[in-house]
Structures are given as C-alpha cells and as structure tokens.
Amino acid sequence: MPEALRLEGVRAGYGATVVLEDVGFSLAERDALAVLGRNGVGKTTMLATIMGLTTFHAGRIEFRGRSVDRLAVHERSRLGIGYVPQTRDIFPSLSVEENLAVAGRPGRWSQERVYDLFPRLAERRAHMGNQISGGEQQMLAMGRALMGDPSLLLLDEPLEGLAPIIVDTLLAAIQRLAREESLTVVLVEQSAKLALEVTDQALVLNRGRIVYSGSSAELLADPERLGSLVIAG
Ligand SMILES: Nc1ncnc2c1ncn2[C@@H]1O[C@H](COP(=O)(O)OP(=O)(O)OP(=O)(O)O)[C@@H](O)[C@H]1O
Ligand SMILES: [Mg+2]
C-alpha cells in the first residue's frame, strides 16, 4: 500500500512552548492507527499539528508523498485531510441538514451517504445542532468531516463521554470507513482496548514522545505492557 502519512522528527507546540518532541511514524493508505496515552501527553497536539493548527518548530509531515508542513489548514483540508476535533465542531443553531450542507464539497460523499452511515442522523435531520444528543453530535461532526471528502480522517476522542450503545455504533462506522470507503484513519482514544480492537497500528505517546509504535493486536495481547504504557507509564 502507498503511504498516506509520514511524520519525521516533528517538533511542535504552541508558540515557544514545545509539546511534541521528535515524533515520527508512517501510516499506509487504508490503515487505521490508534493514538493512545494519558491526559496531557500531546495526542490532540499531534492531530492539530498534522492539520496545521499548532506552531511547527522542526521536522517533516508528508501526506500521500507530498510535503504539507508549510501549507495552510485549508490547503491540507483540500488535499484530503479531514479533522474531527475533540470539541466536536458543529453549528449549534443550524439544523443537522444545514450542518452537513455547509461542509459539502464535490466528491464521494453526499448527505444521503452520511445518513446511510448514521441512520440516526437522518431521523434528526431537521433538528438544530444543539437539540441532538452528544452521540448524535459526534456523528454529525464526523459527517461534516466526510462531506469534505477526505482520504485521511483524524478523530480526536470520538467516544468520549458516550453511552456504550453509541460507542458501538461509532466504532462500527469507523471500521466501515476504513474497510469499505478506503479511508486512512487516525483514532485518538482514552479507551485503549476499544481503539486497539478496531485499528491495525498503534502509537503510545508520553510527554510528547512516542514510547510505543507497532501492531495494535500485539499491544492488545500484552495487557501488562499496555497497562504500563498507557495507565502507569
Ligand atoms: N493552546 C495551548 N497552548 C499552550 N499549551 C497547550 C495548549 N493546548 C494544550 N497545551 C498543552 O500541551 C500539552 C499536551 O496537550 P494535549 O491537549 O495535546 O494533550 P492530550 O494528550 O490531547 O490530552 P487529553 O487526553 O486530556 O485530551 C499539555 O501540557 C497542555 O497543557
Ligand atoms: Mg486531547
């Protein structure tokens, strides 16, 4: 598989503050990557850096073989990087339908295809963004990102605070995007086990550095190591 994403020696943060130190990994197209680690280790900063939302100090970011680390956020987005931030960016005073419509770009996705992925959203299409549940807001945030027709989808803790049944729906949708829609997915998650079950590769961050990089299945099969990396580490 060709490469979707490559980071080399990435050093980035907020202004003079450096959060990520020497972060490097590569991800093949259509693979799903779990990014794990405790609170405050730099998971969100890593996604934001790939998107161009932080201060980039050094290193290299390649998206499908092309250097993107000097490109503006909207240019990365136009090339096919989709980002669903931890804050679930949706417009509270627009309807579900309108939220999807304003995110639309010509490509493989339509509102109907988003509703096919998330039937609950179809039932809520006329509701305002602030009238739907947290799980539905997360589906809408993902739907909005898909409407931009990404080939790489960056998801920041999409399962946070959601009921188990909604978590299952979202995990199934994420797997479907990788398997049937050929998307490359980066999934930041606190629930390590859930994330490892639906991904091929995993990274664990600690204090802005990568402390594990390898197969998800291998880490899942080694609870002791997983515990030391993610919980105690
Ligand atoms: N806008 C900002 N300006 C300055 N420092 C920030 C900013 N956002 C985050 N940080 C700092 O960067 C570090 C990494 O934060 P980040 O949000 O990337 O962690 P995280 O792994 O996503 O945590 P969580 O699991 O709580 O979401 C923390 O020390 C945090 O205080
Ligand atoms: Mg975060």
Image (cartoon, rainbow, N blue to C red):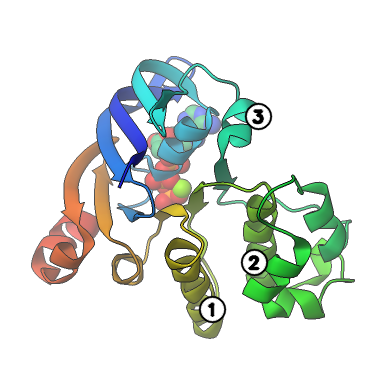
Would you call the spot at circle 3 few (<14 residues within 10 Å), some (14-19), or many (20 or more)?
few
Q: Residue 64's mark?
A: none
Q: Nearer the viewer, residue 12 or 142?
A: 142
Circle 3 SS class: helix
* Residue 66 in the image, given as x and y percentages of width and height: 43, 25
Relative to 222, does residue 203 appear above or below in the rendering? above
Q: Is residue 205 visible?
A: yes
Q: Nearer the viewer, mark 3 or mark 2?
A: 3
Q: Amino acid at mark 3?
A: His
Among the two numbered marks 3 and 1 on one chain, the one whose residue lies closer to the N terminus: 3
* Residue 198 in the image, given as x and y percentages of width and height: 35, 69
Q: Residue 169's mark?
A: 1
Would you call the spot at circle 1 few (<14 residues within 10 Å), some (14-19), or many (20 or more)?
some
* Badge 3 vs badge 1, beta-carbon distance below 8 Å: no
Circle 2 SS class: helix
Q: Nearer the viewer, residue 92 or 79?
A: 79
Residue shown at 47%/55% (left/top)?
183
- The residue where tag 3 is placed is 74
How many numbered marks does the figure carry?
A: 3
**Seen in the image, is 57 located left or right of residue 153?**
left
Q: Is residue 92 visible?
A: no
Relative to 46, does residue 67 appear above or below in the rendering? above
Q: Amino acid at mark 1?
A: Thr
